Every structure is written in C-alpha cells, then in structure tokens.
Image (cartoon, rainbow, N blue to C red):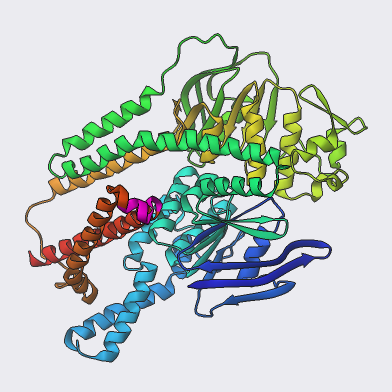
C-alpha cells in the first residue's frame, strides 16, 4: 500500500529548475534513500513531501491518517524541558494508549464477552504492536544510554550543543515510530557506535523510511531502494548501495560509452566492495557460527563464554603487532604522550610511530580526543607529558572549520592568487577550470565568492585546494562531512593514489575501510589502541565481545540469585494479550518451522530452486527466519512470566 504519492512534480526557483515532472511512491515497509550531488534537489523533495514546500506544478497525495514526521536539521523543544522530559513529551499518545489498554484488560477480566470492549481492546493492541510501545520506559532508558544522553537527562535541552539536540530529537522519533519517518543526514553528529544502534532500531522496528545520507555503509545496511536525483529526474534502483552501483553501471553501459570517468569510479567501488566487504563477511561466518553455538552451550557451561572472549581478544591483538623496524622514512614519533582537559583524560601514555606511506584512520567515540591528537601533532597545542618528534617534511591540513579559505575571494582568486588561469596540481600545470571540473564545479562558479557557497561546496573547494599542493603528509579532520557521494568517490580516488602519509579522523566506516591500512582507536579514559584490521572487522569483533560480556553478566546474575522467590508484587495473572500469545504462538511457531524446513529442502534440490529462483527462495527464507526468531523470543518471554506467576 502506497503511503505517499507524488505525481508529475515540478519545482523551480527563479531560473533554477530542480525537479521536472517527477513521480514518486513510497510503499509501507520500504526504506528508501535519496542520493545525488549537493544542490540537486534532495532536501527540496523531502520538504515537498512534508508540505514545507509547495511544488511549482504537480500533485502530492498523502492519506490524512498517515503520520509523517521528519528529523529537523535544527530541532526546537518546549521551553524549560529537560532531556528526558523532552523525549517523554513526544510519547504522550503512546503512554495514554497503553494506560487505556491496561484499563480495558481489567474490564475484560470480568466482562470478557462485551463486543465493544473487545473491539477497542483489539484496536489498541494493534496500535501498540505497530509502535512496539509495550515497554516504553525500558526503551527510553536504552536510547538515553546508546545515544550517550544519560549524563544529560536532567539538563535543559537548550543548554546542549546542536549535535546533542539532534540526538534528543532523533531519540524521540525512533521511539515514537511514525507511519513514515523522514531523515536528512541522520548519521551526522553520531559516532560509529551510535550509528550501529540506529541501524538496529530502524531494522528491528520495521520503519517505513525515507532518508538522505552520504554514509554508504548506512545506506547499504538500511536501504531497500535507492532514488537518485539526476538532471531534474528521479531514477530508482532496488536494494542497497552495492545494488545501486551494479544497476547504475549497467544503466550507464546501456545509455552511452561517454561516461568513462564515472564507469571507472563505479568499477573501482564495485571491485573494492566484492574484494573487501564480501571477503570479510565470508571470513566472519565461522566466527559468527561459533558465537551462536556458544550461546546455546553457555546455558549449561558459563565458562565457555570467558573462553570465547579470550579468543576474540587474541584475534584483535593478533593484528596489533609491529612488523619490526621499517626502512620507510619516519615522519612522527610519539613517546609516552599524555593530554587531559579538566576532569577528563583524552590521551594517556600513548607511544607510536608514523611512517612516510602510512594511511591511518583515527576512530572512536565522540569527545574521546581524536581531533586533539591532530592538534598535538600539528603543534597547535602542547602535551601534558611525553614527546612528539617530527622529521623534515611538508604537511597539508584540512580542518572542519575550513580555515584555509577566504570568504571574500572568488574561486579563481583562491586557486590563482598571482593572477592568470593556470594552477599547479602536484607539480603539473593545469587550467583552473579543468581542475575544478574534476571536483564537479561548473565554469560559472569561477567568479563566485567562497562566502556565497554552501557548506558542502566550501568543503569541495578546501579539499581541491589542499590536494593541489605538493605535500608529504595529509592530516584531515572529518573530510567527508557535508560531501555528496560523488565527491567522496573523487576524494577516495585521490587519497588512494597519494604517495605520502595520511592521518584522518572519520566516523565513515566505508571511507575508513577503503583508505586506512592502520587504526588508532580512541576507547575513552585516555586509552588509545592500534590495530591493522579493517575498521568493519574490528567493530564486528568488538560487538561480539560486548555481546559475550552481556551474556556473562546475565549468567552470573542468574547464578547468584537466591533460589527462594519472594512473592510477586506485580500482576498475579497474565494480561489479555500475554494469554493470547501463550495460547496461539506455539502453533504459529510450529507452522513456521515447517515452512522453513520446506524452503531449506527446496534450496538443496536443484530442480526446485531453479524453478523458483535462488534469490527469491533466499529472501523468503530470511524473512521467515526473522519472523520465527521474533515469535520465539516473544513466546519465551511470555512463558517466563507465566512460570514466574505459577511459582
């Protein structure tokens, strides 16, 4: 069922045409991402859907009963609200529905044949199911923890930074779960751990979603469809980012052979994906299988959890080895480096060396000290203790504030300060337009002042200026912020071919995996680890360790629990919905097991899977297994409540 329909939409600002007769339909359960160059009309399309902008021509159709909400770039909150209050204020409708449901459940206990009450009860049950609002208090606590808002829960929202306020607004929206959720760059101001939690929530809660993002890992994980805004039109591709690349390459081949540069970039992307991501997925299968097996075994033997954690830690440390004394030129040597700010250690006793061809990603949680390390190495601040030795070499530095740009200068003045129209790019003499064209700037931008550019355009100028210089080492602080995917591809190609050292801070997992051969991982409390793994693999192992630690704590808590139970203070019988689930779920689970067994049998029979299609069968099996796990978890949960009441 389509929740949003746009018909023949045209949008024009003065002489600038953004959308020209486009159609768009969003079905229930879809997670659609919008991609395209900065300024192509992505945000305008979102604003037309919300009604914030009216189309020049065309028709927007959204059913009045469909709740559409959008994460604002600059959210506003009620006056005097504290963080937790601001989140709870957005959930009033859900809290009231739950209270009404509980009141009806008590009524039905004595008046169970009343058809009016049963109908209202069923309606509320479906509403709470759709929003998964049965345990809101627990979910609020979790989202406060995962978005690192717990320390601020009693602070006024208006006293937080812009990024923290966006996290509060995002937390409210994912708990509220509107019928359609619109997100514009949702991963901005989130570190990689917060992004993982966001991904988990969006997938687990089955959101209908429309979002704009330049985070390709996030797109590949979340999207079921990619919409590209290109030349005032919308082009639809099924699947995530990898599928988009494959389908776009096929489309480019079909359209014309003149897109050689774009095809080369797409092939490079696809080659890296198939070589890197898929290979890592295969390598991880054995480890994942061991984790699932261990989870079962741990119920009987808790010591196995500790054994697995030790194995994973050893696997992490296996990649932290030094390859011995390198003959490559040493650029930096850090000895016992320490630096703190009031009440917080950022770096403690950190020792390392950086060589001439190292490509190092500096990663970790927000506020841990990643940018501070760059400032120390640049000599902008002084360490509390320790020494930074630096050789003779040139540095190119890109910062988040674009200090190298003069807002009063035009682009041609920025690149040709001595006049003329030629620019030296890595010792190669080029026409300034030819060089800027490679960074997606049209000729009319040459006379445009830097101060009139958007944030993404300024970042492009800053990167183009930096990469034109002859340097031995690039130091980059969040270089992909505000860049569209096309520009990030260009940046990646140039960094991969850069012959010197690169140190960069980033939360972009995809970007890090492509560029970095080494990681500096900021863990918090001054701890900095080194690793030679890909960032995705490091995060995968780290996540498994966290899961095992959680299992260990749960097992220990159960073991230390007194055998005698005190009398329950809470309900002495199951709620109406719990009783329904207890009665119906065993049959539903048994039916699902039979369907799964049938599909597995078909996948093992060439005649069967050739007739139905491997991909179709695999997708159907995956969907059934997900439903099976959800229903099994719910049945075990209700059974545990029932057994506790019986004791």
- Please state if 597 lies on the left or on the right of 146 as rendered: left
Q: Quadrant of residue 425?
A: top right
Q: How many marks?
A: 0
Q: Give how far across and how far down residue 438 sits, in percent.
A: 75, 38
Q: Quadrant of residue 637?
A: bottom left
- Please state if 527 lies on the left or on the right of 398 as rendered: left
At a point 53% along the width and 71% down the height, the residue shown is 68
Dominant SS of magenta comes to: helix
The front one of 637 and 104 is: 637
Q: Give how far across and how far down residue 358 sits, in percent.
A: 56, 21
At a point 15% along the width and 45% down the height, the residue shown is 299
Q: Give how far across and how far down residue 87 sits, in percent.
A: 46, 64
Q: Which residues are magenta?
A: 608-615
Instruction: Classify 35 as above or below 581.
Output: above
Q: Give how far across and how far down residue 510 sits, in percent.
A: 53, 39
The front one of 296 and 523 is: 296
At a point 16% along the width and 71% down the height, the residue shown is 583
Name of the residue lying farthest toward the front: 607
The front one of 644 and 286 is: 286
Which quadrant holds the C terminus?
bottom left
Instruction: Classify 528 as above or below 610.
Output: above
* Magenta run includes residue 100: no
Q: Is residue 98 visible?
A: no
Instruction: Classify 600 as above or below 19.
Output: above
- Please state if 644 lies on the left or on the right of 309 as rendered: left
At a point 40% along the width and 24% down the height, the residue shown is 319
Name of the residue lying farthest toward the right: 420
């Amino acid at each position: 069922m389509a929740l949003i329909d746009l018909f023949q939409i045209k949008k024009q600002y003065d002489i600038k045409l953004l959308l020209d007769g486009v159609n768009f339909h969003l079905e229930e359960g879809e997670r659609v991402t919008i991609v395209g160059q900065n300024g192509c009309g992505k945000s305008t399309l979102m604003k037309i859907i919300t009604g914030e902008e009216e189309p020049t021509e065309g028709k927007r159709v959204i059913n009045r009963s469909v709740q559409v909400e959008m994460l604002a770039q600059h959210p506003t909150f009620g006056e005097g609200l504290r963080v937790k209050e601001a989140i709870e204020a957005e959930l009033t409708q859900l809290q009231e529905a739950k209270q009404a449901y509980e009141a009806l459940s008590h009524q039905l206990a004595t008046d169970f044949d009343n058809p009016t009450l049963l109908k209202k009860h069923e309606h509320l049950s479906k509403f709470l199911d759709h929003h998964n609002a049965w345990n809101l208090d627990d979910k609020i606590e979790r989202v406060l923890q995962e978005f690192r808002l717990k320390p601020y829960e009693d602070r006024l929202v208006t006293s937080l930074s812009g990024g923290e306020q966006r996290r509060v607004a995002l937390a409210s929206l994912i708990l509220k779960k509107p019928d359609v959720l619109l997100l514009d760059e949702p991963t901005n101001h989130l570190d990689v751990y917060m992004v993982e939690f966001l991904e988990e929530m969006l997938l687990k809660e089955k959101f209908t979603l429309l979002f704009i993002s330049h985070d390709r890992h996030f797109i590949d994980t979340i999207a079921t469809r990619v919409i590209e805004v290109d030349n005032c039109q919308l082009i639809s591709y099924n699947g995530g980012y990898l599928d988009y690349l494959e389908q776009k390459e096929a489309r480019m081949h079909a359209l014309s052979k003149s897109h050689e540069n774009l095809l080369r970039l797409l092939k490079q992307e696809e080659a890296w994906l198939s070589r890197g991501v898929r290979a890592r997925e295969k390598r991880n299968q054995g480890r994942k299988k061991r984790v699932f097996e261990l989870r079962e075994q741990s119920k009987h033997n808790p010591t196995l959890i500790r054994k697995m954690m030790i194995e994973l830690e050893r696997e992490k440390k296996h990649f932290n080895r030094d390859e011995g004394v390198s003959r490559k030129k040493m650029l930096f040597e850090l000895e016992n480096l320490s630096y703190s700010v009031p009440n917080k250690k950022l770096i403690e006793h950190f020792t390392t060396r950086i060589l001439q061809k190292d490509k190092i990603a500096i990663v970790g949680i927000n506020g841990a000290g990643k940018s501070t390390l760059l400032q120390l190495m640049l000599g902008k601040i002084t360490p509390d203790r320790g020494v930074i030795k630096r050789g003779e070499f040139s540095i190119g530095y890109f910062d988040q504030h674009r200090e190298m740009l003069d807002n009063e200068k035009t682009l041609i003045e920025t690149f040709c300060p001595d006049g003329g129209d030629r620019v030296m790019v890595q010792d190669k003499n080029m026409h300034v337009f030819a060089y800027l064209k490679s960074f997606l700037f049209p000729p009319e931008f040459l006379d445009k002042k830097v101060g009139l550019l958007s944030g993404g355009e300024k970042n492009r100028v800053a990167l183009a200026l930096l990469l034109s210089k002859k340097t031995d080492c690039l130091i980059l602080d969040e270089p992909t912020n505000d860049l569209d995917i096309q520009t990030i591809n260009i940046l990646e190609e140039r960094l991969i071919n850069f012959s010197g050292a690169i140190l960069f801070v980033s939360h972009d997992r995809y970007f890090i995996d492509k560029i970095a051969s080494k990681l500096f991982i900021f863990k918090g409390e001054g701890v900095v680890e080194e690793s030679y793994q890909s960032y995705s693999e490091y995060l995968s192992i780290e996540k498994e360790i966290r899961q095992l630690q959680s299992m260990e704590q749960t097992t220990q808590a159960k073991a230390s629990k007194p055998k005698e139970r005190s009398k329950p203070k809470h309900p002495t019988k199951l709620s109406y919905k719990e009783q329904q689930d207890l009665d119906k779920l065993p049959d539903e689970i048994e039916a699902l097991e039979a369907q799964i067994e049938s599909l597995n049998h078909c996948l093992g029979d060439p005649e069967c899977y050739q007739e139905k299609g491997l991909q179709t069968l695999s997708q159907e099996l995956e969907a059934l297994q997900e439903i099976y796990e959800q229903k099994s978890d719910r049945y075990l949960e209700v059974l545990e409540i029932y057994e506790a009441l019986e004791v």
